[in-house]
Amino acid sequence: MTNPVKPLVAITQGDPAGIGPELCVKLTHEPSVLGFCRPLILGDRVVLEDAARRLGRPLSATTLTLAEFERTARVDLPDGPLVVDCACLTAPVAPGTPTRDGGRASYAYIENAIRLALARKLDAVTTAPITKQTLKMAGIDDPGHTEIFGRLTGSRDFAMMLYSPRLAVSFVTCHQSLRSVPDALRTEEIERLIHLTAETLRRIRGAEPRLAVLGLNPHAGEGGMFGDEDERIVRPAVEHARAEGWNVEGPIPPDAAFMPRALQRFDGYVTLYHDQGSIPFKMISLHDGVNITMGLPIIRTSVDHGTAYDIAGQGKADPSSLISAIELAARLAAPADADRPSSEDNRHGIESAHRLVSS
């Protein structure tokens, strides 16, 4: 019988042809994970067993069918890592080979996780990587996890954040062409992201965050010399948020926003398009970065990397990002008075980022 205090975190297996199955097998051998949660893998046991065979180590988990899990009270679940076998695949999937069936299964794992989380059978969901390619092959039009979670939870006020102890970035626009970004920017949308980002970081860190909103144009427009979007659209959002009491500055020139001194000054960044935030984040927090979907009625975190078809099935996948994502999900699911990262932890994170940027 399990300890009912630790959060029950579901980990979706991700694309069966990617590195997700290997990562899931590896995390069942990570004793640190059991220290902060009860991990439950939602996937296909046959795929996980194949990944374990390729790794040369067992799948160290108790398996339940989906029906068995749904009818078992939480306090009666077995100790240790769990696998809930969704049995979604109808044909074998080879590592590194995207298929329609793999895309359909990837989506089914997510559907089940969301349904169970909304029913409070789970405390949080962490997702292993999927691809837009196989989703499209399976007839799913959503461009990624964030949009799937938003749609299936009926959420309208949601957005993506990339988080690590050294850096946090959110995105006003995300999966769209760079050409379309200026026309898509709205003052009220930027202000919405300021609110979501501040509230999420306050929940993670337990303190009021200091935020920077990046500009769109070179030098944040240089007073209108290089475009008027920063003064016309971005600045009013920042000023309104400041008037509401948020600790936020901007528009900040993007080329100076992630220098070591700025990283010490700000806890999080609201960026205006995908690569503006994603590039510096991956340079600074490649291995322990976590993707968070803000504004959902459930907790969802994810790895900050893709399916890595080129190394799938080879035993080379690093589980660090997945473990970080599970740990953050468990922390967010814990009671409000649970332990938070200390100011000393945050200071070490900033110093680490300083070294990375300076090197």
Image (cartoon, rainbow, N blue to C red):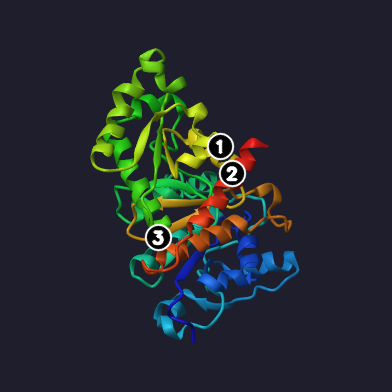
- Residue 29 percent location from the top left of the image: 65, 71
| Residue at numbered disc 3 | 299
Name the residue rendered at 25%, 35% in the picture. 240
Please tell me in which quadrant of the rendered image residue 229 appears.
top left
| Residue at numbered disc 2 | 353
**Is 311 above or below relative to 33?**
above
Which class describes the residues within 10 Å of circle 2: few (<14), some (14-19), or many (20+)?
Answer: many
Name the side, left or right, on which 238 lies relative to 50. left
Looking at the image, is mark 2 or mark 3 earlier in the sequence? 3
Which class describes the residues within 10 Å of circle 1: few (<14), some (14-19), or many (20+)?
Answer: some
- Looking at numbered disc 3 in the image, what kind of residue is underneath it? Ile
Q: Secondary structure at mark 3?
A: loop
- Residue 161 percent location from the top left of the image: 44, 46
Name the side, left or right, on which 109 lies relative to 213. right
Looking at the image, is mark 2 or mark 1 earlier in the sequence? 1
Please tell me in which quadrant of the rendered image residue 338 appears.
bottom left
**Is 191 above or below relative to 32?**
above
Quadrant (top left/top right/bottom left/bottom right) for the C terminus: top right
Given residues 356 and 129, the one toward you in this image is 356
Name the residue rendered at 32%, 36% in the picture. 190
Name the residue rendered at 42%, 26% in the picture. 216
| Residue at numbered disc 1 | 260
- Looking at numbered disc 1 in the image, what kind of residue is underneath it? Pro
**Is 288 above or below relative to 185?**
below
